[in-house]
Amino acid sequence: MNIKWSSPVLALLALSTVLVVPAHADERPPFLLPFACGQEWVAATRSDHSPNPNSLDFTKVGGGSNGQPIVAAAAGRVTFAGWDSGGGWMVNISHANGWGTTYLHMIERPSVGNGQNVYQGFQLGKVGSTGNSSGPHLHFQQWRTSPSNTVRSEFNGWQVTVGVGRSQRLKSQNCTPLEMKNAANTKCLDAAAGGGSGAAVTLYDCWGGNNQKWVWEGNQLKNSANGKCLDAEAGAANGARVMVYDCWDGRNQQWWN
């Protein structure tokens, strides 16, 4: 059966075809919560938040925000790492498609520098209360083109529901396994094959195996191959052994950069 379309219908079909377009060039990067894998944080805001109420203040569920690692919400390039009178020790990162993130009130000088490329999950510094701050927390912004254009944050593909007078509890899925590479020789931390408790950790040529992949969980580094944590030998004098061991809350498994 032959169907003859009227001119208005053909025009509508043509318009529909034009409107079916690929993803926009300004697509938001796949942002993840800027904290260690599995941690839970409460996000809140207020009416006079700078630059607008889309900015978020994060405090750790159960307390203990001070000194917690802050990690990159997405891969990008550090455009500023330093001191600001209001923001204290802070970092700005430029991401793909004109997007950026801001991290304020770090406890000390950031562990990254201007112009440095960082991957998602890379530690930027630690939570603190420097600058114009009433207590340890992370002030966080997602923005388009400029920090002054801060928009509602999105994590794991979902926009937050935080509003004035309405907080939200969020769990970090920033769990990308990372290679821990030495700056002097570019070799990677490598857990010995087998990986039982007490297995040695050495430096070895980087090759991408799971025994060279580590995930930040709080201040602990967990090996992807065996699920055990990087552990310094008791006493930890110069030359002390480093190994993997069952994860527990001992200080010999706490690490910073």
Image (cartoon, grey):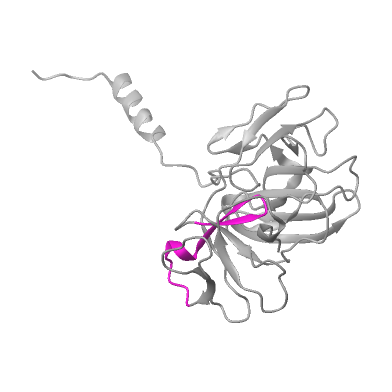
Left/right of residue 87 with respect to residue 121 in the rendered view = right
Residue at (22%, 20%) from the top-left corner?
A: 5
Q: Position of residue 106 (x, y in %)?
A: 80, 52
Q: Which residues are magenta?
A: 205-223
Left/right of residue 16 with respect to residue 92 in the rendered view = left
Residue at (72%, 40%) from the top-left corner?
A: 150
Q: Quadrant of residue 154?
A: top right
Left/right of residue 220 with respect to residue 150 in the rendered view = left
Residue, far bottom: 185
Q: Nearer the viewer, residue 219 or 152?
A: 219
In the depicted structure, whether residue 179 falls above or below residue 170? below
Q: Position of residue 235 (x, y in %)?
A: 72, 69
Which quadrant does the N terminus fall into?
Answer: top left
Q: Position of residue 57 (x, y in %)?
A: 77, 37
**Residue 241: in magenta span:** no
Residue at (82%, 49%) from the top-left corner?
A: 128
In the depicted structure, whether residue 146 falls above or below residue 52? below
Which quadrant does the C terminus fall into?
Answer: bottom right
Q: Is residue 161 visible?
A: yes
Q: Nearer the viewer, residue 198 or 190?
A: 198
In the depicted structure, whether residue 138 falls above or below residue 61? below
Residue, far left: 1
Left/right of residue 253 with respect to residue 211 in the rendered view = right
Q: Quadrant of residue 173?
A: top right
Q: Is residue 118 visible?
A: no
Q: Position of residue 93 (x, y in %)?
A: 68, 55
Number of callouts: 0
